[in-house]
Image: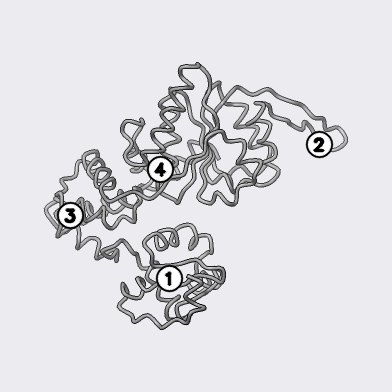
């Protein structure tokens, strides 16, 4: 699929995300350690007048991995080619992208852990030696050819670093882990997005959105847009704290950012499986969701706020989860307690 088709297929929310993304490191809020290290990496490459080393960005969805990839390209003043692990499904697709890169261009691979084995092995010489080993023709007439590549920078993004093979991970010279954002950082992001979208948002409404954004800028911006819709349709266009709370109540986002599926997940663990432990596949089946969705989208925040624990035997609901749902936690024996 070409980049034009990819852009045409984006949803309205994704298009808004593009306009709200910071373009340079100086505009980027949060992830201070990553910003400082990345700034040094980029400045060192500029002073040496050479391409930046390959970069791997890790962390839960919505924390800014794609944004940082575009920032790297903008800071270097080069083009960026964007694809994803599932989209590069054969060697020819990878070769088509690599052979159309220019010197110092950025090649961004989202969900890099989902590259298939054949494509991943074809990527190794491209990352290490800047060459592409192609097979020309088919059958008995096929021949091998080594094609030189320009010195480019590959930026990989993954939500599941543990699924990356060792050889692929080792070919990235810089590895950065993105963590959830603080409430203060999210307030800065919401205020900036409100200015870009020309929305009048009260300070207490900004704080309310930030508090319910699950430590994730993408969610904060999504909630801001929904509050804007509500304020324009049901109010006078201003995002007051009352309008914000009413809008978020309609979305069923509670005071700490849990959404309906989060609460169903906790209720299933507590009610159906007596607080756990319960295996991931069993839990996902009970929710009619894919295990990857549960593990990558919902679990990280629930674990971070202390509502869910992963044990050797499965997922376990903590006492905080019982308290939040207004349920009485069961008494655990010493063996169960030791698992938490």
- Which residue does the numbered mark 1 point to in the structure image? 265
For the residue carrying disc 3, how many other residues have a C-alpha within 10 Å: few (<14), some (14-19), or many (20+)?
A: many
Q: Earlier in the sequence, mark 2 or mark 4?
A: 4
Mark 2 or 4, which is nearer the eye?
A: 4
Give the spatial CA distance, label 1 vs label 4. Answer: 26 Å
Seen from the viewer's position, the closer of residues 252 and 230 is 252
Q: What is the quadrant of residue 19 in the picture? A: top left
Give the spatial CA distance, label 4 vs label 3. Answer: 27 Å
Give the spatial CA distance, label 2 vs label 4. Answer: 42 Å
Say what secondary structure mark 1 lies in.
helix
- Which residue does the numbered mark 2 point to in the structure image? 138
Say what secondary structure mark 3 lies in.
helix
Task: Find residue 301 and report its horizontal and vertical position in percent.
Answer: 40, 59
Mark 2 or 3, which is nearer the eye?
A: 3
Task: Find residue 250 and report its horizontal and vertical position in percent.
Answer: 25, 65
For the residue carrying disc 2, how many other residues have a C-alpha within 10 Å: few (<14), some (14-19), or many (20+)?
A: few
Mark 1 or 3, which is nearer the eye?
A: 1
Q: Earlier in the sequence, mark 1 or mark 3?
A: 3
Give the spatial CA distance, label 2 vs label 3. Answer: 61 Å
């Amino acid at each position: 699929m070409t980049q034009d088709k990819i852009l045409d297929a984006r949803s309205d929310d994704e298009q808004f995300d593009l306009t709200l993304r910071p373009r340079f490191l100086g505009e980027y809020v949060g992830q201070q350690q990553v910003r400082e290290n990345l700034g040094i990496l980029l400045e060192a490459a500029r002073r040496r007048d050479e391409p930046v080393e390959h970069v791997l960005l890790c962390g839960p969805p919505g924390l800014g991995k794609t944004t940082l990839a575009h920032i790297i390209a903008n800071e270097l003043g080069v083009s960026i080619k964007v694809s994803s692990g599932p989209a590069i499904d054969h060697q020819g697709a990878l070769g088509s992208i690599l052979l159309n890169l220019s010197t110092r261009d950025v090649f961004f691979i989202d969900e890099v852990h989902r590259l298939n084995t054949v494509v991943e092995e074809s990527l190794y010489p491209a990352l290490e030696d800047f060459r592409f080993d192609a097979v020309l023709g088919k059958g008995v007439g096929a021949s091998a050819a080594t094609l030189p590549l320009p010195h480019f920078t590959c930026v990989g993004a993954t939500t599941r670093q543990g699924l990356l093979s060792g050889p692929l991970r080792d070919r990235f010279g810089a590895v950065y882990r993105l963590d959830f954002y603080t409430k203060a950082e999210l307030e800065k992001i919401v205020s900036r997005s409100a200015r870009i979208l020309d929305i009048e948002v009260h300070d207490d409404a900004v704080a309310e959105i930030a508090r319910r954004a699950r430590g994730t800028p993408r969610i904060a911006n999504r909630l801001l847009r929904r509050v804007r819709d509500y304020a324009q349709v049901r109010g006078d266009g201003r995002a007051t704290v009352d309008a914000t709370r009413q809008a978020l109540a309609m979305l069923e986002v509670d005071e700490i950012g849990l959404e309906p599926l989060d609460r169903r997940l906790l209720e299933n663990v507590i009610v159906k499986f007596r607080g756990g432990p319960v295996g991931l596949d069993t839990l996902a089946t009970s929710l009619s969701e894919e295990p990857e969705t549960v593990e990558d989208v919902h679990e990280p925040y629930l674990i971070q706020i202390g509502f869910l624990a992963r044990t050797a035997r499965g997922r376990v609901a903590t006492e905080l989860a019982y308290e939040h749902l207004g349920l009485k936690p069961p008494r655990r024996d010493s063996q169960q307690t030791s698992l938490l």
